[in-house]
Amino acid sequence: MADTSDFRNGLAFNMDGEIVQIIEFQHVKPGKGGAFVRTKLKRLRTGATVDKTFRSGEKIDPVFLERVEYQYLYRQGEELVLMDLDSFEQINVPEAVIGDGTEFLKEEMKVLALVANDDVLGYEIPNFVELEIAQTDPGFKGDTVSGSSTKPATLETGAVIQVPYHIKEGDVVKVDTRSGAYLERVKR
């Protein structure tokens, strides 16, 4: 057993029959009354976040989360085929289970499975990926006069993002998989 003094970002524990992970927390000691801890928790099965307040010293049941590394092989319909890098066993995972950002996955990229008590709770894809621009319109001087300084670009994975006008086909760009935002051009 642990208590609120053991709280840290990333700590996973059982709460009301489901496993949650601490995203952020804050110890509060008001001038009057007992101290408490405000937390923002992520439900690992659903990905939903919830705010919860704990009394100082309240007991929790921590859970050991294991991160198992898989390699993304290919897409098969609405499923992604992943390979366990230890046993070389292949599994099919519905795209909806992995969540947002799967359109940025490229073959051979690493995907982490969050496992607790031999039960897969969810998957994590890399937050940032570097992908090549497969198709985009050329940018011309003066194009920014219209007010928008971005143009659509199709990545090698088929995903479409907005990029600045100076980006051209063949450039490699860094993309945030959580928001789908262009971050920077990668020099090679």
Image (spheres, grey):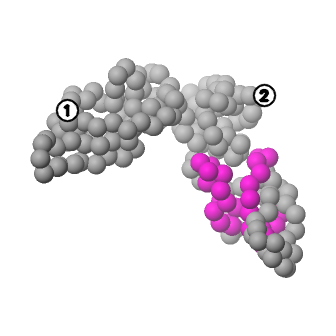
Q: Which residue is mark 2?
A: 77
In this view, the residue in front, 79 or 108, is 79
Q: Amino acid at mark 2?
A: Gly
Residue name at image x 61 percent, y 35 percent = 99
Hey, which residue is sitting farthest bottom in the picture? 141
Side (left or right) of 70 relative to 155? left
Q: Secondary structure at mark 2?
A: loop
Residue 16 versus residue 55 in the image, above or below: above
User: Mark 2 packing: few (<14 Cα in 10 Å), some, or many (20+)?
Assistant: few
| Residue located at (76% from left, 68% from top) | 148
Q: Which residues are magenta?
A: 157-186
The kind of residue on which mark 1 rests is: Glu
Left or right: 107 as drawn, with respect to 49: right
Q: Quadrant of residue 18?
A: top left
Side (left or right) of 142 relative to 113: right
- Please tell me which residue is depicted at 49% across the width and 28% down the height of the picture: 45
Spot occupied by residue 71 in the image (x, y as percentages of width and height): 62, 38
State how far apart marks 1 and 2 are (Cα).
47 Å
Horizontal and vertical percent position of residue 142 = 84, 79
